[in-house]
Amino acid sequence: MEEISAQFPILQTRAHGRPLVYLDSAASTQQPEAVIRAVSDYHRHHHANIHRGVYQLSQTATHLYEDARARVAGFLGAAEPAECIFTSGTTAAINLVASAWGRASLAPGDEIILSVLEHHSNIVPWQLAAEASGARIKVIPINDAGELDLDAYRALLSPRTRIVAINHVSNALGTINPVREIIAEAHAAGALVLIDGAQWVAHGPVDVQALDADFYAFSGHKLYGPTGIGVLYGKRRLLETMPPYQGGGDMIERVTFARTTYAPLPNKFEAGTPHISGAVGLAAAIDWIETIGLERIGAHEQSLLRHTTGRLAEIPGLELKGTAREKSAVVSWVMVDPPIATLDVATQLDLAGVCIRTGHHCCQPLMDRLGVSSTARASMGVYNRKEDIDRLADGLAEITSAALKRSRASVAHIVPEPTPDVLYPAAVAQSPEAAAEEIVELFAFLPDWPMRHQHIIDLGDQLPVMPASLKSAANAVSGCQSTVHIAARLKPGTDDVIEFLADSDANIVRGLIALLQQLYSGQPARAILDFDAEALFARIGLDENLSMTRRNGLASMIQRLKQLAQQSAG
Ligand code: PLP
């Protein structure tokens, strides 16, 4: 197992000068040389559209695509390849069932059972189906360890339950759910079951027939395969009675303007040209996994999980989220004492070459249940080694000790809360453009991300204090990763100059707020509306290290400011 990482070209690269440690496999696994080569060979030697051409190349491509389906069927233990529909991923697979099955089968008063542990892609499609049909959603609660409350589940099951849609493994906490038992209980109540297998298939064997799953969904990119390809397994008798999901080429038998008849399975659910090279890559990934064996992979990951849990227990102030008895190699945590925003944890680990994920992990209802807005998450794959976990733990220990020093220093200088009037920052330049030029000049002296990062943190340290009274719900800005408040006002004595205060729990965001204040605070509303701060952030190279639109609420802050400017510009 120790040598497996050598088969992954990306794992031989460096990040910020350090050997890359990749601990975000629950988001996407990396691809081994065998998969990269299979996809590249397909593009170099075999590409053509499938099912249609009589020429040799098209026949070969068709053969490769259908062979991939047969490999998927074998991998899942399906009764036949036609029960395996290629989709773009788990999300598309669940949407297919919620939409096509839901349209034909759900009626007002019917019930759909989900759980608190679900990913948004196993919640929102069912909400859409419920809205369209008048069905209702019931939710299985969890205990504090992050395990499903099975008694509550049994109590929710009733003759009205039409489907139970549940994940095999929670992406945010790693809880492995007792899906066999869940399926048996649902069937006894006359309901179907869809299993979201996105987080299981790369970590242990699955046999859809032995489980008796009605539907099973997974994504190639979490299984050492390419992105944009996934699978929906469905029992033939169910797929046959479902209407098509999308209409188009390849899914028809005969089309007239009066009436269209549909192709048999699996084509009925594969409208349009599919992701052929993705299917080829997925088959190569399955072959590659099978040469190692999922039992061995699972055992290796369990040993990494034990090592991680032990090392993280040594970090002061770190609180684990999700301590289920049955867990896959996913570890989630928050830093509570001293509090350190998860965004800062991930940004600083990145500087040490360690990739982890932070945020709500597309599980906002679960975050609400846990009472946090985000967690930091390390998730492991077959290629990880104990040294990777040690790099993570050492990085966390450094971050914690630096934060402890900072918090001791700030306790020593408690200042009375000043009044907001004194603090709203005035303009630093004639216009946002002029302020931007000064920022660009300064950043030109900071050639790499570590230096820019440090400068941004320093700016954040000098941010004018935002009084607690202004950190109200009305002033909160929804960002994916951190808590942000912003309060703007018209400068006294003017009717169009806007000043604002803002704050965040994340130091990196505080620094970005300081940059926004330099650009916008004290400027006329019209100038604020006309200036594109995101383009400036790209100009100074921040878009390479911070995904502006999704990660830190920066885009929401700019939007909020512009809304306020719009209101006063009339
Ligand atoms: N379900 C779970 C449990 C997941 O972890 C994910 C992705 O993180 C998905 C569904 C969605 O997968 P995809 O984005 O590949 O469609």
Image (cartoon, rainbow, N blue to C red):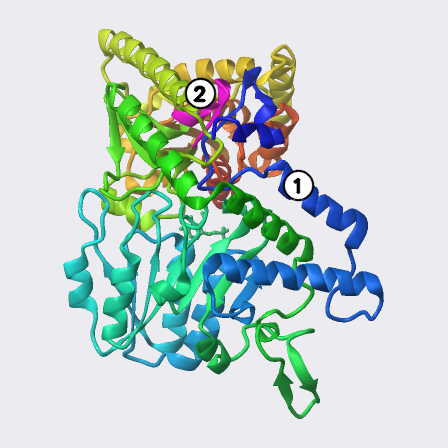
Cα distance between the residues tagged 1 and 2: 30 Å
Q: Is residue 434 visible?
A: yes
Whether pointer 1 and pointer 2 mark residues with C-beta atoms closer than 8 Å, the reply is no
Q: Quadrant of residue 398?
A: top left
Residue 348: which numbered mark, if any? 2
Residue 277: which numbered mark, if any? none
Residue 217 locus on image (x, y percent): 45, 59
According to the picture, the residue beneath numbered tag 1 turns out to be 36
Q: Amino acid at mark 2?
A: Gln
Residue at image point 69% right, 41% down: 37
Residue at mark 1: C-beta within 8 A of ligand 1: no
Residue 243 locus on image (x, y percent): 51, 80
* Secondary element at tag 1: helix
* Secondary element at tag 2: helix
Magenta segment range?
344-356
Q: Quadrant of residue 132?
A: bottom left
Which secondary structure class fits the magenta region best?
helix
Q: Is residue 338 left or right of residue 265?
A: left
Q: Amino acid at mark 1?
A: Ile
Front residue of 132 and 195: 195
Front residue of 425 and 198: 198
| Residue 129 lies in the magenta-colored region | no
Front residue of 236 and 146: 236
Front residue of 562 and 131: 131
